[in-house]
Amino acid sequence: MLLTLAGNYAIVSAKRKIIPRYGIPDTFPKFIGDVFAMSKDHTSSVQSVVRALSLLDILAESPADCSLSEITKQAGLPTSTVHRLLTSLIQAGYVSQNPDTTRYRLGHNLIRLSHKATQKHDLIQLARPWLEEMATQTGETVNLTARFDDSVIQLDHVDSPNMLRVSYPSGERFPLHASASGKLFLAFLSSDERQRILDRARHPFTQATIIDKRKLEAELERIRQQGYAIDDAEREVGVRCVAAPIRNARGEVAAAISISGPSVRITVQRLHELAVSIMKTACTVSEAWQTRTTSYTIRAR
């Protein structure tokens, strides 16, 4: 998080780790781990990743399933290396092998990843005008976020026009239990998945961070009842935020719009007033996104 007073002058600055914009599926870390395990040497490990990606390119460009020899020839790599990489890709779901012909094709996980990335990109483009309008109307920073594993990722944002403002760059990650969007996602998860996350220890970012499980469960129930979530200095002292859900065509909470600002401007009373506006905007974006989203079933060849 960066709280700026003017131009490049920073009041609060925190080191942050930027990750891919559109997120990655849960199986990807396993795939990376498998590939990196092939060599302890860093350079060799990076080379293995590049080679594995080149195999995906070969399969993507092929009009039909490929044999091991065909992939090996196009890749210009030893057969043992290609086979080892394909095995890791199969385990991660990025490549599949026809059990009858033993030929290879792109896996459903890769197709699912492509579909999710396209959906998020469409949502970013779709929501942008509403983000800009709300930032102008409220004078505060407006954010578009999505859940990324057990955290929240910033997809897009429009900064407040005020010199004193709160700004989160795209790619910034937030904890589920200590952010408005995060608590929103938690509230609408399935019971089993929510309990899995709640059973873990929680870091107290500020004195206002809710770390007690029962209190957090009560907070999540309140969010489900009122339809929005607030962050009252629970992650950053002096910063407040309110978030409302964006639902996909299946009615699932797939993203969120939030308003963030310094507590000197966003009082507790104003926080709940902004909630009314942001819920209306989130509902409008949801309806527009649902209209544009086409559901389809991936059929195996």
Image: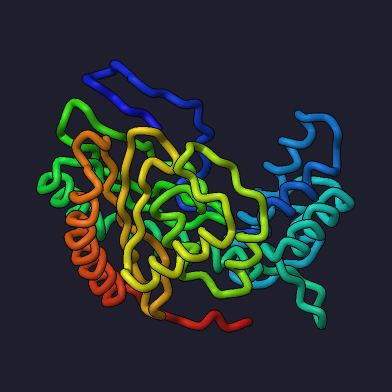
Query: Looking at the image, is 262 positioned above or below residue 151?
Result: above
Q: Looking at the image, which residue sits at the far right? A: 80
Instruction: Please indicate whether residue 83 sits to the left or right of residue 25 in the image.
Output: right
Task: State the colouring used for the structure image.
Answer: rainbow
**Relative horizontal placement of residue 181, taking residue 160 as reference (left or right):** right
- Asked if residue 107 lies left or right of residue 299, the reply is right
Would residue 16 be found to the left or right of residue 223 on screen? Answer: right
Q: Quadrant of the N terminus?
A: top left
- Residue that lies at the very extreme toward the top in this rendered image: 9
On the image, which quarter does residue 72 sit in?
A: bottom right
Q: Residue at x 31, y 56 (%)?
A: 257
Q: Residue at x 74, y 59 (%)?
A: 89
Report if residue 122 is visible in the image. no
| Nearer to the camera, 117 or 194 | 194
Residue 37 x/y as whole percent: 84, 43
Which residue does the image show at 49% across and 43% down from the upper left?
Answer: 173
Which residue: 52% across, 64% down? 217
* Residue 262 lies in quadrant: top left
Whether residue 280 is visible = yes
- Which one is in front, 92 or 170? 170
Q: Is residue 292 above or below residue 182?
A: below
Q: Does 59 appear above or below 151? A: below
**Closer to the camera in the image, 185 or 25:** 185
Residue 283: give x, y in percent of width and height. Answer: 24, 70
Q: Position of residue 35 (x, y in %)?
A: 78, 47
Q: Residue furthest left?
A: 137
